[in-house]
Image (tube, rainbow, N blue to C red):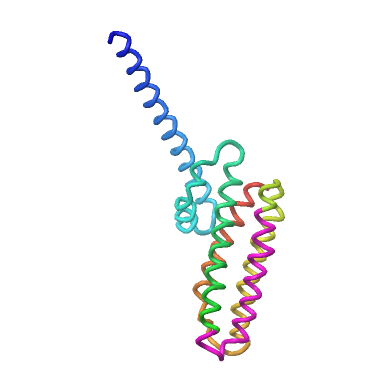
Amino acid sequence: MRNLFPILMLITNLSLNNDTTNNSNNNNNNNLIHTTCRATPNYSLCLTTLQSDPRSYKAEGGDDITTLGLVMVDAVKLKSVQITERIKELEKSNPEWRVPLSQCYMAYYAVQRADVTVAVEALKKGVPKFAEDGMVDVVVEAETCEYSFEYKKLVSPISDMNRDIIELSKVAKFIIRMLL
């Protein structure tokens, strides 16, 4: 019984130190998130996006900003998937929008298959310039989608979504630029 007490104290002490270390890492990463987001054009969007992904808190060492960039690029990808799903729904219910919606679909297909894929690979390989270019291309694709409606003198039913992805890609671009 005498030997059991010091062992329990040691185990308790080690577990408390472990929690303190984890909290310290989380605080450091939370500070990094705030600092990074302050350098972007949309602080609140950046903050909510990064804080919603657990990878933002697990980043360590020199890969911190790269991880935050990957989180933002993944958010762009997720938004483009949501937009393509919305486009499919709208095509069924509004045949007059068929042509501009198909142009939007092609634009977002390019976002998913080219721009986001290139950005992820570039970040993983340490070539942030190509990742930045991919996020610039996302803005062009979203604007192309909007223009396809304006050209037909129609009001885009996905303008809000296009604006959202433009904002996300701008934030991603600013984070990626920190790696240059």
How many numbered badges does the structure rendering display? 0
Above or below residue 138? Residue 102 is: below
Q: Quadrant of the N terminus?
A: top left
Above or below residue 33? Residue 174 is: below
Image coordinates of residue 54 in percent, x first then y, are: 48, 47
Q: Is the magenta stretch mostly helix, strand or loop?
A: helix
Q: Classify residue 131 by image quadrant.
A: bottom right
Q: Which residue lies furthest to the front in this view?
A: 1
In the rendered structure, does residue 105 fall within the stretch colored magenta?
Answer: yes
Q: Residue furthest left?
A: 1
In the rendered structure, does residue 75 fall within the stretch colored magenta?
Answer: no
Image coordinates of residue 58 in percent, x first then y, are: 51, 41
Residue depicted at 58% across the width and 45% down the height:
65
Image coordinates of residue 151 in percent, x first then y, are: 63, 87
Left or right: 127 as drawn, with respect to 89: right
Above or below residue 47? Residue 145 is: below
The residue stretch that appears in magenta = 92-120
Image coordinates of residue 94 in percent, x first then y, are: 52, 88
Residue depicted at 71% across the width and 47% down the height:
125
Left or right: 174 as drawn, with respect to 44: right
Residue depicted at 61% across the width and 41% down the height:
63
Residue depicted at 45% across the width and 55% down the height:
48
Q: Classify residue 142 by image quadrant.
A: bottom right
Residue sitting nearer the eye, 163 or 59: 59
